[in-house]
Amino acid sequence: MTLEMAVLASGSSGNAIYLADGQTALLIDAGLSGKEIERRMNLIERSMAGVDALLLTHEHGDHIKGAGVLSRRYNLPVYATEGTWLAGGEKLGPLKPEHKKLVRENWELGKLQITSFPIPHDAREPVGYIISDGQVKVGLATDIGYITAEISQCLQGMDCLLLEANHDIDLLREGSYPGSLKRRIRGEGGHLSNEETARLLPDILESSSCCCPVVLLSHLSAENNRPELAYLTVKNSLQAAGYRVGSDVILKCAPRNEPGELYRLSGRIEEAGLP
Ligand SMILES: [Zn+2]
Ligand SMILES: [Zn+2]
């Protein structure tokens, strides 16, 4: 079996990830307008009509903006934690009662096995996800105030990992954001820096059984980060731990404003070359 995965958008202006196993297709977060998500799906030569369910990580607008519209338009169930429903349910607009699904710690959609785990962030009950077809494991974790032991444990051994690298600490400190916002981003309910991600990655990749896991640095700040800086900070840390970046591990920054490559993940990573 092969998992297909593509990042449609990543960052504070919107997040959406497409993941499918040939039988079941999911969208994890829908933080762009419904129309824009449809457009980006078409760019990776997939259709929203083929999606079976939406999974939400938390209620912030950059993660749920289009979820209500897409649920209504395509008759899609939406999975969210109780806290996300409480804090964000109204923003989604009216949904059919049968479309309001609760995220569990472990459940299955088709043959996809899904695990959720809590994340510290200034939302009501935010989560990250691990999604597997039984062979390949994909981990998604962004909007992380700080790395907990549970996050570090859950993300061990992924074949593909979308992990936040939100800001460079110096760029944030010297940048134009007001002090209160800088404190929020750096705080326990904020976002993970390049440096924190760089420290975490060598440990959690160690237990990967995959010959060459893919790491996509995600939710990069447009204001307080640069893709080349995030990449270099993490690359240096991986190299210092003995990884050959490019052959032992594929490292890239998730795209912000256009869909990225469609990856085919089957133990051996192949890029489909789309778009
Ligand atoms: Zn976000
Ligand atoms: Zn958030």
Image (spheres, rainbow, N blue to C red):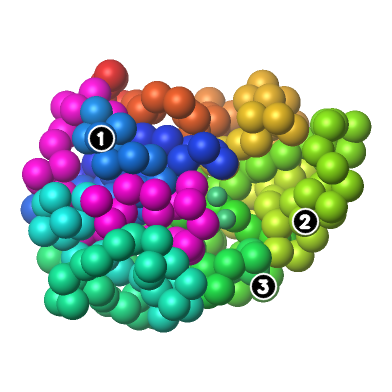
Q: Amino acid at mark 2?
A: Arg
Decide which of 64, 17 is in the foreground and name it. Answer: 64
Is ligand 2 within 8 Å of the beta carbon of the residue shown at mark 2? no
- Circle 2 or circle 1, nearest the eye: 1
Q: Examine the rendering and report whether any part of residue 21 can be seen.
A: no
- Residue at 24%, 28% (x, y): give it: 39
- Residue at 55%, 53% (x, y): give it: 142
Q: Residue 137: where, in percent of width, then height? A: 36, 56
Q: Please, what secondary structure does the residue beneath circle 3 have?
A: helix
Q: Is residue 203 magenta?
A: no
Residue hosting label 2: 184
- Circle 2 or circle 3, nearest the eye: 2
The span shown in magenta is 40-69
- Residue at 84%, 52% (x, y): give it: 180
Q: Which mark is residue 35?
A: 1
- In this rendering, is residue 196 above or below 78? above
Q: Residue 74: where, in percent of width, then height? A: 12, 52
**In 3D space, how far apart are the residues under numbered discs 1 and 3 (Cα atoms)?**
38 Å
